[in-house]
Image (cartoon, rainbow, N blue to C red):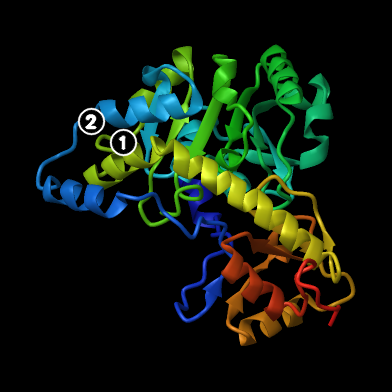
């Protein structure tokens, strides 16, 4: 990390509502957690008076099985963002350029700048069209799939073709799959290319944002650099044990995907009565409120006890909010707070 860049860096806004009295739709986390988490955590806490095994064999095995790679390719990190930072630390030097999509997760540009490098912004839906003239000056390119905040996932074939162009240009490709677990799409870990790094998070799918567990996946010398650079004891014992437990809950994952897909479509149909809603493969929907005042929409929802995300903080968006997809009862509260009715409830537009 570049010391000079730290002096001028700023933090970026995120979802997440500190007021526990509000129903939080500003953060895209699962409202449910797998069965058995409490017991696993309690047992792990009892063993936390000694250092964890820094090799994390059980966690690596679970992570590798989840994305379909060899265990030695999985690098434990305290959350998906830690995997992103680790990948940038071993790739970027001061003065480098990095290709960063927009609108997308604000931490990409911030982490690039913290390394003393410069983000080069390109629209997320134009990213796969860039050629060698753009790629060759860039040490790193970032893809977010599904993209946050728009929600659309990258086509695997298009992503593989883009990875090939990155290889030809000598550009490292970082694929953030924080929300990919909500889809049936394969992980880019399956590409198994030395210039490709995948970042995964357990935060969203398993509803445990405070646990801070994730992992990176890489191959060859890139994998060796990540393994060398990662912090010793990078996961606490509770995070490693609970994380491994969650990653093996196949039925929980299947049920979550089905519920979110069903509720997302129901919410989209309702929200489209009032807003322009972006198609999504993720557990959130991006809504263009048009001529309505974004701050008023947010304030009105908050007055009804619901927090939603001000999406105007994302580069390139100026009339948008983002709402999470949760369980049916909570989603109904959101729709009511936004003044829309469920399309299948037999009601009329308000």
Measured as percent of width and height from the top left, residue 208 is found at: 41, 54
Q: Is residue 106 visible?
A: no
Mark 1 lies on a secondary structure that is loop
From what the image shows, is residue 187 above or below residue 346?
Answer: above
**Mark count:** 2
Q: What residue is shown at x 27% (from left), y 55% (from top)?
A: 38
Whether the residues at callouts 1 and 2 have beta carbons within 8 Å, the answer is: no
Relative vertical location of residue 234 with respect to residue 262 in this rendering, above or below: above
Q: Residue furthest right?
A: 291
Seen in the picture, residue 172 relative to 100 is either above or below; the reply is above
Residue 129 or 74: which is nearer the viewer?
74
Image mark for residue 272: none
Q: Nearer the viewer, residue 184 or 323?
A: 184
Residue beneath disc 2: 54
Q: Quadrant of the C terminus?
A: bottom right
- Dot 1: few (<14), some (14–19), or many (≥20) neighbours within 10 Å? some
Q: Check disc 2 and report its element: helix, strand or loop.
A: loop
Q: CA–CA distance between discs 1 and 2?
A: 9 Å
Residue underneath mark 1: 231
**Front one among 200 and 1:** 200
* Residue 8: quarter of image: bottom right
User: Residue 314 location in percent, x, y?
Assistant: 71, 58
Residue furthest to the front in view is: 346
């Amino acid at each position: 990390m570049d010391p000079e860049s730290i002096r001028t860096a700023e933090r970026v806004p995120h979802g997440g509502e500190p007021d526990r009295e509000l129903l939080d739709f500003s953060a895209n986390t699962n409202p449910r957690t797998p069965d058995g988490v409490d017991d696993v955590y309690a047992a792990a806490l009892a063993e936390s008076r000694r250092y964890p095994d820094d090799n994390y064999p059980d966690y690596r095995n679970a992570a590798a099985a989840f994305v379909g790679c060899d265990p030695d390719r999985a690098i434990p990190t305290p959350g998906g963002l830690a995997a992103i930072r680790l990948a940038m630390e071993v790739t970027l030097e001061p003065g480098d350029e990095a290709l960063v999509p927009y609108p997308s997760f604000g931490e990409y540009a911030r982490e690039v700048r913290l390394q003393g490098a410069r983000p080069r912004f390109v629209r997320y839906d134009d990213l796969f069209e860039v050629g060698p003239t753009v790629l060759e000056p860039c040490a790193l390119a970032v893809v977010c799939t599904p993209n946050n905040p728009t929600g659309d996932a990258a086509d695997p074939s298009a992503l593989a073709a883009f990875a090939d162009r990155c290889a030809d240009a000598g550009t490292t490709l970082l694929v953030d799959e924080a929300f990919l677990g909500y889809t049936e799409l394969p992980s880019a870990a399956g590409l198994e290319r030395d210039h490709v790094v995948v970042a995964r998070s357990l935060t969203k799918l398993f509803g445990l944002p405070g646990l801070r567990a994730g992992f990176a996946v890489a191959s060859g010398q890139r994998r060796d650099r990540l393994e060398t650079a990662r912090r010793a004891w990078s996961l606490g014992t509770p995070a490693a044990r609970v994380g491994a437990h969650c990653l093996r809950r196949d039925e929980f994952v299947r049920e979550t995907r089905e519920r979110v897909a069903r509720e997302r479509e129901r919410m989209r149909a309702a929200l489209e009565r009032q807003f322009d809603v972006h198609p999504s493969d993720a557990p959130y929907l991006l809504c263009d409120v048009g001529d309505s005042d974004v701050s008023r929409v947010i304030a009105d929802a908050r007055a009804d006890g619901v927090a939603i995300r001000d999406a105007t903080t994302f580069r390139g968006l100026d009339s948008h909010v983002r709402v999470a997809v949760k369980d049916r009862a909570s989603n109904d509260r959101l729709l009511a707070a936004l003044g829309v009715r469920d399309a299948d409830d037999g009601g009329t537009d308000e």
